[in-house]
Amino acid sequence: MIKRQINLVRLAAALIAQLLISTASLMSASDAATCVECPAGRVWNLNEPGCTKCPQGRCTDVGQCARCPPGTSQAKPGQRDCQPCPVGMHQPASGQAGCTACPAGEEAPSRGAINCTECRPGFNKSESGAQLCGACPAGSYSDELASLECQLCPPGQFSHTAGQSACQPCPAGTFANWTGASACVVCPAGRDQKHEGGLDCQACRRGFYKAYPAVDDCKLCQPGYYNRAEGSLGCLACPAGYYCPRPWVDPESCPALSVCPAGSYEPIQCRGPFLAADKSSNACQATASLYAVLSASAIVSVIVGLAVAGYVRAWRRRRRRRAGLVDASGAGAADFSDSMTAAAASATAGNERMPLIKGGDGGPVYSGL
Ligand SMILES: *[C@@H]1O[C@H](CO)[C@@H](O)[C@H](O)[C@H]1NC(C)=O
Ligand SMILES: *[C@@H]1O[C@H](CO)[C@@H](O)[C@H](O)[C@H]1NC(C)=O
Ligand SMILES: *[C@@H]1O[C@H](CO)[C@@H](O)[C@H](O)[C@H]1NC(C)=O
């Protein structure tokens, strides 16, 4: 009887113990499901219970510590967010604690770069580091990708703004005789340059000139002007007594029977009786013999004229006398109306060759008859 009671007590104790154990395990499971939520940057660790920090290069807001993606990094443990790489740095791999500077000749112009980009032509970067590619300054250029250094423009070429991939040849009329020109120089007075890319300017040839510094070519002297020297700023007027057919040769002496006033392009030839008394005068002049000929012919004409007049008078007088009219007039000197009267009389006498105006009776009508 006593033994049986002992067995019952044991059974009850075992039941209670079983109950207690299962209750404890239930309570433990309930703790894990509802109480554990690690803060950002930390995760639950099964091996050593509790929240532990994410390592460098990994971050979380909740859940697992994820590897920072390419272009970002995280240097500190226990962080919620990854940091994008700053300008000038890059990170091609994931899960990294930091970003690396782009090498020389390459740059990362914006944040979060995975790869660096090569400097464009016209730009360069001589050192690795955080700085960006810089534009090649005026007077220099870079014609390739990823340049470390810019090249200076060679003589005869220039680049007038920064960031050029090539230099331009100096235009005609200008020159640059040094390296690294940002501009070319205009040819000075007395010199010109007909080609692009000039290293210097050439002196104007003889017969040509240029008065002012300009890109223009030297000009040929005007007709009648000349110069002997190279690199002239102007031309000389051809002196009197000379002529200048080609402005690059010395003035030529005025030939015989010609005149050459100052500024002559060609001699003026004197023709016939006109001669050059003075070669440097402005025009041909009549000679002394021409004057003699002219005066002689004038005298001869006067004499001939007088003789003809005398003969004509004498003839008229003879005609009048023959017509018997000289005595009727009673005067010694005949005048115009006299002679007309004589003509009329001869007409009435039957000479029909002279046309006359006749009156109604067929007789001549003249006033003063
Ligand atoms: C970065 O460079 C690597 C190798 O040079 C290339 O395979 C990859 O496509 C590049 N990524 C980007 C985003 O340019
Ligand atoms: C580019 O090259 C020049 C020399 O050619 C150098 O002085 C300059 O610092 C370089 N620019 C950069 C951004 O490195
Ligand atoms: C460049 O040209 C100028 C003017 O013609 C001259 O004075 C100078 O000596 C030249 N310099 C060189 C390096 O040839």
Image (cartoon, rainbow, N blue to C red):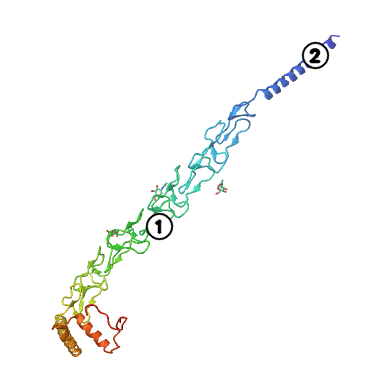
Mark 1 = which residue? 168
User: Is residue 118 depicted above or below 51 in this figure?
Assistant: below
**Front position in the image: 277 or 263:** 277
Residue 300 or 188: which is nearer the viewer? 300
Q: Is residue 139 above or below residue 12?
A: below
Kindly indicate the quadrant of the structure image that contains residue 152: bottom left
Q: Residue at x 30, y 65 (%)?
A: 219
Pinpoint residue 214: horizontal percent, then vertical percent. Answer: 31, 59
Q: Residue furthest front?
A: 361
Residue that carries the numbered disc 2 in the rendered image: 12
Instruction: Kindly identify the amino acid type of the residue bearing the numbered disc 1.
Output: Gln
- The disc labelled 2 sits on which kind of residue? Ala
Between circles 2 and 1, the one closer to the viewer is 1
Residue 295 coordinates in the image, percent (x, y):
14, 81
| Residue 333 percent coordinates (x, y) | 14, 82
Q: Which residue occupies 80% across, 14% down?
A: 12
Element marked by disc 2: helix
Quarter of the image with the N terminus in it: top right
Relative image position of residue 30 (x, y in whole percent): 70, 22
Local crowd at mark 2 within 10 Å, few (<14), some, or many (≥20)?
few
For marks 2 and 1 on the same chain, the one whose residue lies earlier in the sequence: 2
